[in-house]
Amino acid sequence: MGIQDIIEGKRQWRAHLTRIKALPPDYQIVYKEMQRYFFKVGPVELHEGTLLSGIADFFEEGAAAGKGVLELIGDDVAAFCDDLIKDSRTYAEIYQESLGTT
């Protein structure tokens, strides 16, 4: 990864955060909780950038339709997150496999 890749990644991340900051406050709160959850669980595809940007798209559509964030995802944010990554490998799984304790 070169310096240009790092700079481009930062630019894309800042643009993503700008999108999130434009959402209604309840959406921002739930997004931050989801982000924290994903960073802790560590789905491998998180680094590809499609997971969080897909959530931003979904939230922008819901906000534009006038729906509350919990109308979109339900009351259990963790369960919603788990459902999003249920078929994804996580770094925790990879680590468990490397230890031979799966």
Image (spheres, helix red, strand yellow):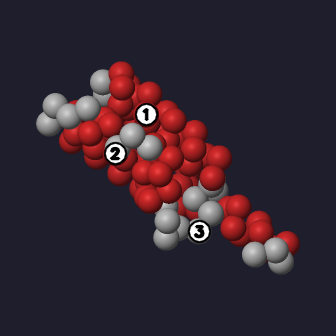
Left or right: 87 in relation to 42: left
Amino acid at circle 3: Arg
Q: Which circle, 3 or 2, is nearer the viewer? A: 2
Quadrant assignment, res 72: top left
Give me the residue at 56% from left, 48% from top: 38
Q: Residue furthest right?
A: 99
Amino acid at circle 1: Val
Look at mark 1 in the image and give the residue it sits on.
30
Q: Earlier in the sequence, mark 3 or mark 2?
A: 2
Q: Earlier in the sequence, mark 1 or mark 3?
A: 1
| Quadrant of the snapshot with the C terminus | bottom right
Query: Pointer 3: residues within 10 angstroms few (<14), some, or many (20+)?
Result: few
Query: Pointer 2: residues within 10 angstroms few (<14), some, or many (20+)?
Result: some
Q: Residue furthest top?
A: 25
Look at mark 3 in the image and give the residue it sits on.
89
Look at mark 2 in the image and give the residue it sits on.
73
Does the image show residue 18?
no
As drawn, 66 above or below 44: above
Left or right: 42 in relation to 52: right
Counting from the top left corner in percent of width and height, residue 13 is at: 48, 39
User: Which numbered circle lies on residue 68?
Assistant: none
Dots 3 and 2: beta carbons under 8 Å? no
